[in-house]
Amino acid sequence: MKVGDPQLRRNLRAATRGIRQKRNAVVAEVEDWEELRVAGEAIKRDAMGRLDVLLEQLEDAVTRAGGKVHWARDAVEANAVIGDLVAGHDAREVVKVKSLTTDEIELNQALERRGITAIETDLAELIVQLSDDWPSHILVPAIHRNRSEIRDVFARELGLEGLSDDPEELTDAARRHLRQAFLRARVGVSGANFGIAETGTVGVVESEGNGRMCTTLPPVLITVMGIEKVLPAWRDLEVFLQLLPRSSTGERMNPYTSLWTGVSEDDGPGEFHLVLLDNGRTRVLADEVGRDALHCIRCSACLNVCPVYERVGGHAYGSIYPGPIGAILTPQLRGIPGDADELPWASSLCGACADVCPVKIDIPRLLVHLRSRVGGSDPALRLMGWAMAGRRRFEAAQLGRVPGMRTGIGMGAWTKGRDLPPPPRETFRQWWRRTRG
Amino acid sequence: MRVALFVTCLVDTLFPRAGIATVKVLERAGCEVEFPADQTCCGQMHRNTGASVEAARLARRLPDVFAGYDVIVTPSASCAATVRETTDLGVFELSEFLVRELGVEDVGASFPHRVTYHPTCHSLRALRVGDAPLRLLRAVRGLELVELPEARECCGFGGTFAIKNADVSLAMLDDKLRCVRETGAAVCTAADCSCLMHIGGGLRRAGDYVRTLHLAEILAS
């Protein structure tokens, strides 16, 4: 992986450390935080264990409440369903809530190919979209941009010549631009943080209120939900609505929590579609260790503590899911072997991610598991493994008497920025034999 | 108490002084130290790199190598964590063994220098040795302990990560070295020779005067 330029690293360092401190402060004030994490993990494990049943239950409940459920095996199917729905309403544009799942299936691009414009309404997503860029953080998609860059993008794309880089003025410009879109739009598109099997309720948590606009103003609402987002019961929200905001934005509660159950006659959209997306998730489920990656609630706490993420930035992970969670999720979603096989090595296994994960995903364990699935061995490691599996071979290797061992283990990469320790006069076991033998 | 020393392949081969110091400290604490000579490597490097066949072969040797010992002590937090994860053996990292098992904090050492302590990731988050190393260091005569800024940040070693992702590893090391220098310490110590090899290698490359010493070497002085 490539180390980011100094500006990017400074931005990331300042931003992630800021969120980290906020997160630590609001987590510390919750007395039963560890119990909440245990509960979060247990609920997710239970849900993944009977996903088939829960999803059908969710479909029934959504249908009873007046919504329609669509099943999509992959991105192509999901994009086709959504495109058909939008086209069926003669709509040429949709307003979108910030959604990783729709980024995962590259919905905006698919809609564009059908002549439909998708307008991102989350401020940072809007910045990313207007710059023809790609999000680099789960929660803070434009974390790699500073405000003078944002000013330039807004001035150019929104035609606002005299704009300053004052954050308030920038936000105001975005708000004016988006208000028109909210009022015009006939179709809203969202992802989902949760789908409750028991009640058919779907929910989105957000900070800016744009999500509330998208899910209530347009007459048609389409929600794309990864199948792993299902929760068995309404009361499970108690756990996740505490875990998620404190872990992600470092807030006690997020400003907007929108929950809707099908359609209501005089309130909100009159038509609701729920697209249930697989796109590799059942493949992840088939791996009994790796499937824990599906427990993720997309809080991004693991990104904010990851020393590798801080240095390489989100784009280096080649997917919408960056950082430690991306390193365990992306290779599994795409399939092993595949184009994301190197990602499990993007970690020093420092374990900081596992300590903050609100649903206790043992990320280092999954990384090691996936390394083994991809196949981490090579001739040098095999030779070393052979040499270490017997005392006499090991002692010969210690004294440099196993050919090929020194050259095979990447000393060139080591000495790029580090000296090797000077060789000792005798090994420990030689000392032991000499003095104690 | 009779204890088996698991010296680890790295200490045995490249850092024998840390192993010798571990023996001295344990003996000073009243232990009878034995060195089962069939020991080689716990398989951590293979395991963490995803070479699971080789890792399993090395892990399988351990119960035989240490048969008959209730207590195994090692000067490496990361190797202790690996042995704990792959076997049922009673293995302890040196500082947690001294402080938690023996209840010893003052091992009678004297080291009149300015020292900073880097808590390695595996001592911090895999073994959770807590402040055991700091308690031992605070009891050393003449030693001035300086807190390391951003101590809990990984140094960037990470086993084969240091080679496979050398640039990222070195970027992490740069920040660790900056923090070590800020302390003005003469010595940076830790509970793992692997991380110290990385930090020390960076310091030597930079021509720095700060030395790296394993915790045991300070405790044995």
Image: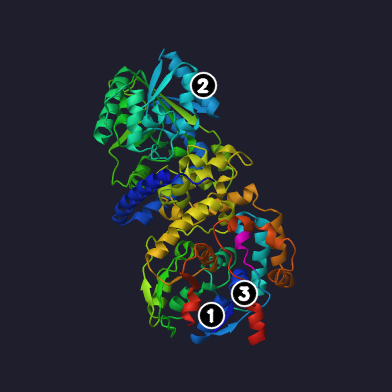
Residue, far top: A90
Specify the amino acid type for callout 1: Ala
Q: Residues within 10 Å of mark 1 (few under 14, many from 20)?
A: many
Question: Where A25 falls versus A273 (above or below)?
Answer: below
Mark 2 vs mark 1, foreground winner is 1
Q: Position of residue A8 (x, y in %)?
A: 42, 43
Chain containing the residue with disc 3? A
Q: Earlier in the sequence, mark 3 or mark 2?
A: 2
Q: Which residue is mark 1?
A: B21
Chain containing the residue with disc 2? A
Distance, label 1 to label 3, CA atoms, is 15 Å
**Highlighted magenta segment, given as a residue range:** B41-46
The numbered mark at residue A424 is 3
Q: Nearer the viewer, residue A56 or A189?
A: A189
Specify the amino acid type for callout 3: Pro
Distance, label 3 to label 2, CA atoms, is 66 Å
Specify the amino acid type for callout 2: Ala
Q: Position of residue B204 (x, y in %)?
A: 52, 65
Residue B44 forms part of the magenta stretch:
yes
Q: Nearer the viewer, residue A157 or A104?
A: A157
Q: Secondary structure at mark 1?
A: helix
Q: Position of residue A112 (x, y in %)?
A: 47, 20
Residue B20 forms part of the magenta stretch:
no
Distance, label 2 to label 1, CA atoms, is 68 Å
Q: Secondary structure at mark 3?
A: loop
Q: Nearer the viewer, residue A410 or B5?
A: A410
The numbered mark at residue A80 is 2
Left or right: B63 as drawn, with respect to A367: right
The numbered mark at residue A419 is none
Left or right: A361 as drawn, with respect to A379: left
Residues at discs 1 and 3 in contact (Cβ within 8 Å): no
Left or right: B81 as drawn, with respect to A392: left
